[in-house]
Image: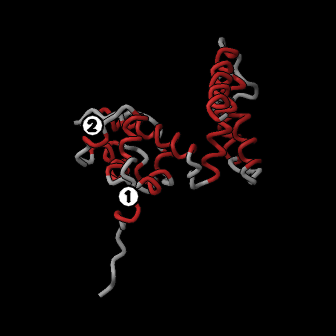
Amino acid sequence: MEHIHTLSIQNTYDADFIKRVEEASGQQVSKCYQCGNCSASCNYTYVYDYPVNQIMRLIQLGQREIVLKSRSIWLCASCQACTTRCPCNIEVSHVMESLRIMSREEKMVSLKDIQLFYDEFLRSVKTFGRVFETGLLPVFNMKAKRPFGDMDLAPLVLKKGKLHLLPSRIKGRKEVAGIFERLEAFHKKHEA
């Protein structure tokens, strides 16, 4: 008979994890009773390594490392479909955002391209007040060491007018940059 490899939760259990996730997200993950509505509602379940309900259960089981290293937390689009159908009124996107923050803080992002894209996206927002896709993708692809990635999409997207060659001039660009500067000053103050 073949031995089935199961998750050894006793060895990897972090008793403090659920409390930290609940405090960071403001949600009671412990109330989730695994109805599966979140996973059934999610358009991205097919690309997740763990469906949303399994992420919630892994949090309940104190599986910090598995959750924080998962791809799923980074692929969540925060569309709120899961929250809309949750009978426990858990704001799952708040939980997922909190997990992304924890994953970065604990340096547990498993795929470097995910963290690189996240960093470049935020840099673009800081610089232009909103994301400038035409500038974001080439910089990301160069840093990810695949300079011609997504190049096949550019002509079609440009033809449809979905991609602009210059960044939009938005009102409040300096105020958006100020938010980033205050956050960076806060982090520097608390790291010292």
Q: Position of residue 130 (x, y in %)?
A: 64, 24
- The residue furthest bottom is 1
Q: Quadrant of residue 127?
A: top right
Q: How far across and how far down the image is residue 94, in percent?
A: 41, 34
Mark 1 packing: few (<14 Cα in 10 Å), some, or many (20+)?
Answer: some
Secondary structure at numbered mark 2:
loop
Q: State the residue at coordinates (51%, 54%).
A: 69
How many angstroms separate mark 2 from mark 1 (CA)? 26 Å
Viewer-side residue, 93 vs 23? 23
The chosen color scheme is secondary structure
Q: Which disc is residue 13 wearing?
A: 1
Return the disc, 2 or 1, that comes first in the chain's sequence: 1
Image quarter where the N terminus lies is: bottom left
How many callouts does the rendering have?
2
Picture quadrant of residue 84: top left
Q: Which mark is residue 122?
A: none
For label 1, the SS is loop
User: Quick check: 146 left or right of 17?
Assistant: right
> Looking at the image, which residue is at 39% across and 35% down?
23
In this rendering, position of residue 163 left or right of residue 12: right
- Which of labels 2 and 1 is toward the front? 1
Q: Position of residue 113 (x, y in %)?
A: 64, 50
Q: Give, as a three-letter code, the residue at label 1.
A: Tyr
Disc 2 marks a residue whose amino acid type is Cys
Task: Report which residue position mark 2 lands on.
Answer: 86
State the residue in front, 17 or 177.
17
**183 in relation to 92, above or below:** above
137, above or below 3, in the image: above
Residue under the image location 66 percent in, 11 percent down: 171
Picture residue at 44% right of the left edge, 40% below the top:
96
